[in-house]
Amino acid sequence: MNSLLHDFTAGILRAPEPPCLSLYQPTHRHHPGTQQDPIRFRNLVKTLEESLRRKYSARDLHPLLQPFQTLADDHQFWNHNLDGLAVLAGPGVFQVYKLQRPVPELAVVAESFHIKPLIRILQSADRYHVLGVSRQQIRLFEGNRDALDEVELDPAVPRTATEVVREKESKEDHLSVWPSAPGTGVHHGTASTAELQNNETDRFLRAVDRAILKHYSRPFGLPLILAALPENQTFFRQISRNPFVVAEGVTTYPDALSLETLRERAWQVMEPHYLARLAGLTEMFGAARSKELGDDDLEPIASNAVAGRIGTLLIEADRIVPGRIDTATGEIELGELGDPEVDDLLDDVAELVLKNSGEVVVVPTARMPGTNGIAAIYRF
């Protein structure tokens, strides 16, 4: 399975060769919904084919559509899905992403990939990590307001204290002194069992803190909620150097909770941060507009996106404005999605902002400033 974060960060999704095929559909985790998913997928592929035939020859269609047919026939794939599916394809490209939240059905052929649903997933204000911490093991989860799933940890992240102890012993098997907390020297044969256990825990959690920061917190930039007994919360917070750890936590290790209960308790911690961020974005837009550094009109926003003036762009989650944009001038032309040269203008503007190192945030309709589905904060 492709890594959405890696591909998005690397710019793979923003530098395609046309035609670019984008397919999105909600999927199901359990039977009987899983039976309908491949049927709906085949129907969406037919929509892609119909759009392609308006511009491309039958000879061009086969290499583009064959990977879709192979995926449609993969029974193992359809029996193990999440809440949504994205497939982006083009000449020499076939990227498949299982998504943690549902997405509206969409099948579109255009000059670039339709990536707004992926931006929403990667840059939505409601995403977070949960780190389950005990003195002997950890578990990591990724969630949003609606779902929570365990993360398959990177091999560089230690899962248990035993892994860290064995690694240390293999590197220092000729030393007679156990590494310990600063200012202490614990020697074999003299330290109590409790002292050795504390040193092992300290070493383990420091290694976990470094690895989680490197492989998850910095790349994703998500709030990190601790799920641990109070004494382990205190222990971890004392040694942690991770600035993404939030002050509140879930005071139970995940093993003692169902996944849904853990999600509910994590969201209780996360929701105030989520609402505060959305309120902050709205306030920032209002302040910018009062200084003529903000706009919610699509036409000037498009031209300013081309010029690289947009620092932050807000786009409405469920709004689509079919059309095309001239990436040299920013001039826009409305159209209809069946045209293989037409995509969502909001999506296209978002791509331009990202290419110019701006921030794009997909916002729920109820929290969106203005009524046009788009709002920009200019750099100058």
Image (cartoon, rainbow, N blue to C red):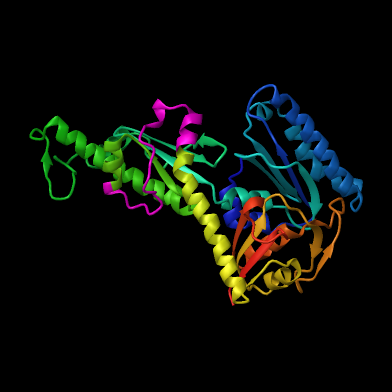
Numbered disc total: 0
- Image coordinates of residue 54 in percent, x first then y, are 92, 51
- Image coordinates of residue 317 in percent, x first then y, are 67, 51
Asked whether residue 173 appears in the rendered view, the answer is no
- Image coordinates of residue 13 in percent, x first then y, are 66, 54
> For this rendering, which residue is in front, 290 or 205?
290
Residue at image point 46% right, 39% down: 266
Left or right: 154 in relation to 279: left
**Vertical side of 13 occupied by 103: above or below:** above
| Residue 1 lies in the magenta-colored region | no
Image quadrant where residue 368 sits:
bottom right
Residue at image point 52% right, 40% down: 143
Residue at image point 89% right, 51% down: 56
| Residue 251 lies in the magenta-colored region | yes
**Vertical side of 124 occupied by 174: above or below:** above
- Image coordinates of residue 109 in percent, x first then y, are 81, 51
Left or right: 369 in relation to 107: left
| Range covered by the magenta-colored residues | 238-265
> For this rendering, which residue is in front, 184 or 290?
290
**Image quarter of the C terminus:** bottom right
Asked whether residue 346 appears in the rendered view, the answer is yes
In the displayed image of the protein, which residue is found farthest to the top? 32
> For this rendering, which residue is in front, 190 or 24?
24
> For this rendering, which residue is in front, 81 or 120?
120
Residue at image point 64% right, 66% down: 376
**Image quarter of the N terminus:** top right
